[in-house]
Each structure stands twice: as C-alpha cells, then as structure tokens.
Image (spheres, rainbow, N blue to C red):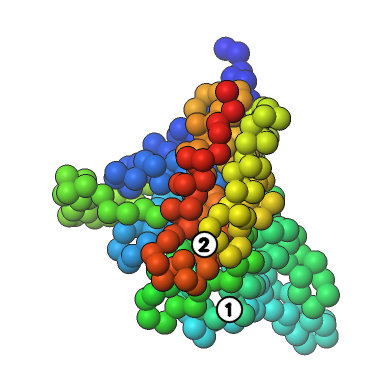
Amino acid sequence: MAEPAPREKARHTCRKIADNISRVMRGQSAATRKLLAALASGGHVLLEDYPGTGKTTLAKALALSLDAQFKRIQFTPDLLPSDILGVSVYHQREQEFRFVPGPVFANIVLADEINRASPRTQSALLEAMAEGQVSAEGQRHPLPAMFFVMATQNPVEFRGTYPLPEAQMDRFALMFKLGYVSPEEEVAIMTAQQQHHPIEDLRPCATTADVLEVQQAVRQVRVSDELKRYMVELVNATRHAPGVQLGASPRGSLALMKTAQALALMDGLDFVAPEQVREVAVAVLAHRLVMDPQARFAGQTATGVIEEVLKKVPVPA
C-alpha cells in the first residue's frame, strides 16, 4: 500500500487529534479548530474566558492526545521567574553550579491563569515563546523543537489579576474564548461526568514527530501575492482605525498568514483562500490592538474594530 502524501498525512494527524479532543470537549469544535491551527502553525495560544468554561480542560485534552512531555504551571502572585525557567544549583562534590531546567523545558506548557502572576514573572516566557530558548546566567539553553505554550486567563476585571503587557500579548498567535455551550451540550457534559471525567480515558493518538511533520506541511501551503497583500491591508487598517491607539504589528501579519495556512491544510486545500484569513482574523489580530481610553469608555472593542475592518477592506477576487 502506497504511503500517503505528507500533506494528506498531516491532515489525517490533525483530524485524529481533533476527534480525540472532542471526546472530552463537547460543543467546542470551533475552539478546537483554532487551537490546532495554532499548534500546526508553530504559534502559541491564549485562552480567555470566565472560570469553569473548560479552558484548562481543553489544554489538558490536547496534551493528553499527544505522546509528548507536558508541564503545567499554576501562576500565582508569589511565583518567581526562576520557578518557570530554572535555577543554577551548586554541587558540592564537583564544586560547580549546574543549571536545573524549570517546567518551561517541555513540549507542551500550560500556563494556567497567567494573569494571576506579576508582570515580572509573566515576562519570563517572552524569550521562550519568541525564540525557543532560555537565557540564564549568560548561557543559552534551547527548548525542544516542538514547543507549544497554552496560557489561560480570566478577564482582567477579576480580582487579583495583572493585565498582560502588549509585548507579551503579541507573542500569542491567537487569543480566543470558549464561551458557554448550548443547554443540550451542557446536559451531555453532566451526563458524561456523572461517574468519572472522560479526560481520564484519553490516550495519545500522535507524537511530537507527527506534529513537526504537520508544521512542515503547513509551511508548504501556497499563499498568493494577492492574498498576502490582502492580509497586510487588513493589518494596516487596524493602525488607522478610529479609537485604536496601537494597531497590530508585522508579527500579526505573519501569524495571520501562518494560521490561515494551517486552516487551509486542515480544509484539504493546497493554497490559502480568503475564507481562512477571514475566519481567523479576529482571533489573530484583536488581542494585539490597544484601544484608546475614550473609545473603551464608549464601549468600543478590539473585536468590533477587526469586524469593521473585515467589512471595509476589499476581498481579492
């Protein structure tokens, strides 16, 4: 039997992972699709929603679906950067300091309730997320080739939270909410968890090597010059939109292209279509905007700005 083409194999891997996650996350197919698009494009994800909506469960379901090293970091006000990155410990016998890696040295890292920690601790993830490495005491320590950060946060209006700085928000390829499921799905969730949690039955269905192959296949998906121009025009429009103090950065353009490539692969296409760009534009760009205080007080939101930009910028034929 012939070996499937790399692109078809990658699409099959994504489908297996999505099906595995759906055994736990009912009614969240759209959120799962965005999560897998971020993973396949090599980006990182920030899940923001109210407590109890399943943010941590979604992250754990993905981790358990992969045969990979998984570490969970519970962010608290007293957490220190060294608790995340690692610390040098003195070995008396050898009479030297040795670096002991922290929990960030894993394939999948869950930064749970990231905005509960101080900005100093939040910034410990900046270099790791942007460059795939940790610098400690003048030494560079590379992270695994397959490195994926899933962070969760409660809305910043909640007590005891610290809003993430703009530079940190820009490191996340996507930010999205899960929202509440339908009453029928909520009843199904209650029934499924009446005896035990379905997540206990999850088993790995893919490996880190499979994910790296998916990421390689995503990079091969074609993006026309016209569509690149369309994405740049969308991002550029956010910089001049009324009520926006700071628009999306060029990193936003790159994230939009890579995530759209991942969606196209999952949809069975060899090229990116405008539909994939428009589908993911809000999740990729909205969290990168800084709204003017007056616009915020007037009820204007970054999501609303992106939706308006999508209406105004012409879609390439």
Q: Is residue 120 above or below residue 104?
A: below
Mark identifier at residue 243: 2
196 lies left or right of 159: left
Which amino acid, mark 2?
Gly
* Residue with the most extreme top position: 1
- Estimate the x, y position of residue 78 in percent, counting from the top left: 52, 85
**Picture mark count:** 2
User: Residue sitting at 43 percent across and 53 percent down?
Assistant: 304
Label located before the other in sequence (1 or 2):
1
**Residue 272 at least partly seen:** yes
Q: Horizontal placement of 268 versus 214: left or right? A: left
Q: Which residue is mark 1?
A: 119
Q: Position of residue 174 (x, y in %)?
A: 53, 52
- Identify the residue at image location x=58%, y=71%: 165
Between 101 and 53, the residue placed more toward the observer is 53
Name the quadrant of the C terminus: top right
Above or below 292: residue 69: above
